[in-house]
Amino acid sequence: QVKLVESGGGSVQAGGSLRLSCVASGWTASPKCMGWFRQVPGKEREKVASIESGDQTTYTGSVKGRFTISKDNAKNTLYLQMNSLKPEDTAMYYCAAKSCWLEAFNYWGQGTQVTVSS
Protein backbone atom coordinates (compact mmCIF):
# COMPACT_ATOMS: atom_id res chain seq x y z
CA GLN A 1 0.00 0.00 0.00
CA VAL A 2 1.35 3.39 -0.99
CA LYS A 3 2.03 5.70 1.92
CA LEU A 4 3.16 9.33 1.75
CA VAL A 5 4.38 11.09 4.88
CA GLU A 6 5.09 14.82 4.85
CA SER A 7 7.21 16.80 7.28
CA GLY A 8 8.86 20.19 7.53
CA GLY A 9 5.91 22.50 7.93
CA GLY A 10 5.79 25.19 10.57
CA SER A 11 5.46 28.89 11.26
CA VAL A 12 7.77 31.45 9.72
CA GLN A 13 7.83 35.17 9.14
CA ALA A 14 7.39 36.65 5.69
CA GLY A 15 10.59 36.43 3.71
CA GLY A 16 11.68 33.27 5.47
CA SER A 17 12.22 29.77 4.15
CA LEU A 18 11.00 26.25 4.81
CA ARG A 19 11.74 22.90 3.23
CA LEU A 20 9.02 20.29 3.05
CA SER A 21 9.83 16.60 2.71
CA CYS A 22 7.67 13.68 1.65
CA VAL A 23 8.78 10.09 2.09
CA ALA A 24 7.03 7.59 -0.17
CA SER A 25 6.76 3.90 0.62
CA GLY A 26 4.98 0.88 -0.79
CA TRP A 27 5.22 1.92 -4.43
CA THR A 28 5.52 -1.13 -6.68
CA ALA A 29 3.78 0.03 -9.83
CA SER A 30 4.97 1.89 -12.89
CA PRO A 31 7.22 4.96 -12.62
CA LYS A 32 5.64 7.45 -10.32
CA CYS A 33 5.26 11.17 -10.67
CA MET A 34 4.88 13.33 -7.60
CA GLY A 35 3.77 16.77 -6.64
CA TRP A 36 2.89 19.24 -3.95
CA PHE A 37 -0.55 20.74 -3.47
CA ARG A 38 -1.89 23.23 -0.96
CA GLN A 39 -5.30 24.09 0.39
CA VAL A 40 -6.75 26.90 2.42
CA PRO A 41 -10.06 26.29 4.25
CA GLY A 42 -12.97 27.18 2.01
CA LYS A 43 -10.92 27.05 -1.18
CA GLU A 44 -10.09 24.37 -3.72
CA ARG A 45 -6.87 22.42 -3.51
CA GLU A 46 -4.21 24.01 -5.71
CA LYS A 47 -1.27 22.29 -7.39
CA VAL A 48 1.89 24.07 -6.34
CA ALA A 49 4.56 22.08 -8.16
CA SER A 50 5.11 18.66 -9.68
CA ILE A 51 7.70 16.43 -11.25
CA GLU A 52 6.23 14.76 -14.32
CA SER A 53 7.51 12.30 -16.91
CA GLY A 54 11.09 12.87 -17.94
CA ASP A 55 11.61 14.73 -14.68
CA GLN A 56 9.94 17.80 -16.08
CA THR A 57 8.97 20.21 -13.34
CA THR A 58 5.90 22.41 -13.26
CA TYR A 59 5.05 25.30 -10.97
CA THR A 60 1.98 27.40 -10.40
CA GLY A 61 2.63 31.01 -11.35
CA SER A 62 2.55 32.48 -7.87
CA VAL A 63 5.50 30.37 -6.66
CA LYS A 64 7.77 30.47 -9.71
CA GLY A 65 11.20 31.73 -8.77
CA ARG A 66 10.55 31.17 -5.06
CA PHE A 67 9.81 27.45 -4.70
CA THR A 68 11.87 24.53 -5.99
CA ILE A 69 10.65 20.94 -6.23
CA SER A 70 13.19 18.14 -6.22
CA LYS A 71 13.49 14.46 -5.40
CA ASP A 72 15.99 11.95 -4.13
CA ASN A 73 15.15 8.59 -5.72
CA ALA A 74 17.55 6.70 -3.45
CA LYS A 75 15.66 7.98 -0.42
CA ASN A 76 12.20 7.84 -2.03
CA THR A 77 11.82 11.42 -0.91
CA LEU A 78 10.25 14.45 -2.53
CA TYR A 79 11.18 17.97 -1.43
CA LEU A 80 9.76 21.45 -1.74
CA GLN A 81 12.17 24.25 -0.96
CA MET A 82 10.18 27.38 -0.24
CA ASN A 83 11.98 30.71 -0.16
CA SER A 84 10.78 34.30 0.15
CA LEU A 85 7.61 33.07 1.77
CA LYS A 86 4.56 35.32 1.78
CA PRO A 87 1.49 35.34 4.03
CA GLU A 88 -0.56 34.14 1.05
CA ASP A 89 1.51 30.94 1.03
CA THR A 90 -0.16 29.97 4.30
CA ALA A 91 -1.97 26.68 3.73
CA MET A 92 -1.99 22.97 4.41
CA TYR A 93 0.52 21.42 2.04
CA TYR A 94 -0.04 17.92 0.69
CA CYS A 95 2.29 15.51 -1.06
CA ALA A 96 0.73 13.52 -3.89
CA ALA A 97 1.73 10.69 -6.20
CA LYS A 98 0.42 8.97 -9.33
CA SER A 99 1.51 6.66 -12.10
CA CYS A 100 3.02 9.02 -14.63
CA TRP A 101 0.61 7.98 -17.37
CA LEU A 102 -2.35 9.18 -15.31
CA GLU A 103 -3.51 12.76 -15.41
CA ALA A 104 -4.81 12.98 -11.86
CA PHE A 105 -2.89 12.33 -8.66
CA ASN A 106 -4.47 9.54 -6.69
CA TYR A 107 -2.31 9.04 -3.62
CA TRP A 108 -2.14 11.68 -0.90
CA GLY A 109 -0.30 12.35 2.31
CA GLN A 110 -1.90 13.65 5.48
CA GLY A 111 -0.63 17.20 5.00
CA THR A 112 1.69 19.55 6.82
CA GLN A 113 0.71 23.08 7.87
CA VAL A 114 2.68 26.09 6.69
CA THR A 115 1.90 29.43 8.33
CA VAL A 116 3.58 32.65 7.18
CA SER A 117 3.09 35.75 9.30
CA SER A 118 3.57 39.30 8.11
Image (cartoon, rainbow, N blue to C red):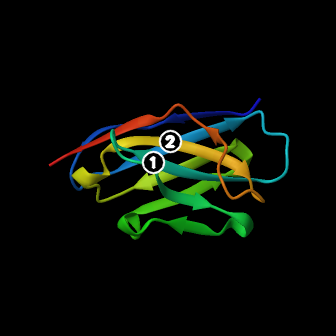
Residue at the image point whose x is 33% and y is 51% from the top: 17
From the viewer's perspective, is residue 3 above or below residue 107? above
- Near mark 2 (Cα within 10 A), the count class, few <14, some 14-19 or many ≥20, is many
SS for dot 1: loop
Residue 82 point in image, percent of width and height = 39, 54
Residue at the image point whose x is 65% and y is 49% from the top: 105
SS for dot 2: strand
Residue at the image point whose x is 29% and y is 59% from the top: 84
Q: Classify residue 115 as left or right of residue 3.
A: left
Residue at the image point whose x is 49% and y is 49% from the top: 37
Query: Disc 1, disc 2: CB below 8 Å?
Result: yes
**Residue position for label 1:** 45
Q: Quadrant of the N terminus?
A: top right
Marks 1/2: CA–CA distance: 9 Å
Q: Classify residue 35 as left or right of residue 112.
A: right
- Of the residues under marks 1 and 2, which one precedes in the sequence? 1
Q: Nearer the viewer, residue 43 or 2?
A: 43
From the viewer's perspective, is residue 50 above or below residue 37? below
**Residue position for label 2:** 94
Amino acid type at image mark 1: Arg
Amino acid type at image mark 2: Tyr
Q: Nearer the viewer, residue 28 or 11?
A: 28
Residue 6 point in image, percent of width and height = 53, 36
